[in-house]
Amino acid sequence: MKDLIIIGAGPAGLTAAIYGIRSGLDLMILEKLSPGGQVMNTYEVENYPGFVEPVSGWELMSRMENQTRRLGAEIASGEVDSVRRDAKGSVFVVTLSDKSEVHAKTVIAAAGASYRRLEVPGEEDLIGHGVSFCATCDGAFYKDRVCAVIGGGDTALEEAHFLTRFARKVYLIHRRDQFRGVKILQERISASERIEPVIDTVVESINGSMKVESIALKNVKTGKQSTLAVDGVFIFVGFDANTGFLPAEILDKNREVITDIKMRTSIPGLFAAGDLRSGSRRQIVMAAAEGATAALEAYDYILGLT
């Protein structure tokens, strides 16, 4: 039986492991994909302390992973189906998709969040055929082509600006009349000759037979409908917390985890950190700090069991 199981190997999970290992805990990280989380798809990170120049998301997370492994943390591949207490209520049972089980005294849920869908006709059918959720991953395929970026937050603005390295034209489509991204990103968008903002507008469908050919738009104020010919659609309209494996009693109406300032849920010994938390600002440095807090609280909890 482990002292601690950490679910997710993004910034929160890896930092939790670093602090847990240094506290002497016998722990395991479970990650269904590869370590690094969503940050791996980020072209540049320029707001993480300690890096004078922007650092690629891949490099930042690789450094975190290597640091975690150097300290001796075990990172295992596995998708978690459920987390529950055993019959005595003293141990957590973590069940994986292959029906195997791992037992631990404490659990930190740090599984992050997934890109939210538009849920319009054509979206699911054309994923991988012009519909993408990662400009860093797929931008190079659109050299001298026309793309649409959907969204108005930091990620949408960052990815739209990144796409100008390849695409000859980028339409930045947002349902409100103002973008929500930080000022410096809005200034970059305004300064780019290749980006054309399309505000007060929503996507009604993504069209194409074998690949994306166009998108159907609607102005939310005037009701006017139009069609825009594009080769690619990049969607950045928010995230949904990856909490399907957690007890419903610790989730809010948005299915995000409710914790206190110490990352404790209402179930003693079960903690949460990072993007799946209710009220998360989805910043790398904040996720890391929450992971550290959760690990230290897990250590204190285990001390209290003796």
Image (tube, rainbow, N blue to C red):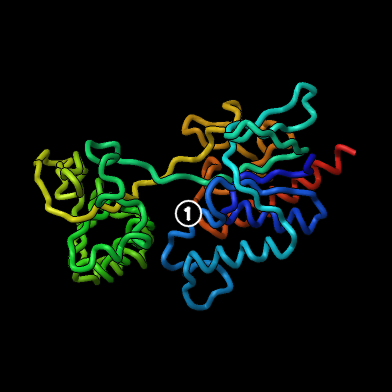
* Quadrant (top left, top right, bottom left, bottom right) of the C terminus: top right
Residue that carries the numbered disc 1 in the rendered image: 38
Using a 10 Å C-alpha cutoff, classify the residue at mark 1 as few (fewer than 14 neighbours), some (14 to 19) or many (20 or more). Answer: some
Q: What amino acid is found at the position of numbered circle 1 in the picture?
A: Gln
- Describe residue 66's horizontal placement relative to residue 88 as left or right: left
Q: Nearer the viewer, residue 285 or 12?
A: 12
Total numbered badges shown on the rendered structure: 1
Residue at the image point whose x is 19% and y is 49% from the top: 212
Q: Quadrant of residue 232?
A: bottom left
What residue do we see at 57% from left, 27% from top? 248
Residue 141 is situated, as x and y percent measured from the top left of the image, at 27, 63
Horizontal and vertical percent for residue 156?
A: 33, 56
Where residue 236 sits: x, y (%)? 34, 50
* In the rendered image, the vertical position of residue 191 relative to residue 172, given as above or below: below
Q: Quadrant of the N terminus?
A: top right
- Tell me the residue at 26%/55% (across/down): 149
Q: Quadrant of residue 198?
A: bottom left
Left or right of residue 186: residue 79: right
Residue at disc 1, secondary structure? helix
Which residue is situated farthest in the bottom direction here? Answer: 52
Q: Is residue 146 above or below residue 28?
A: below
Q: Taking 218 as reference, is 62 above or below it?
A: below
Q: Residue at x 66, y 49 (%)?
A: 29
Residue farthest top in this picture: 87
Expressed as whole percent of the image width and height from the top left, the position of residue 213 reads 15, 50
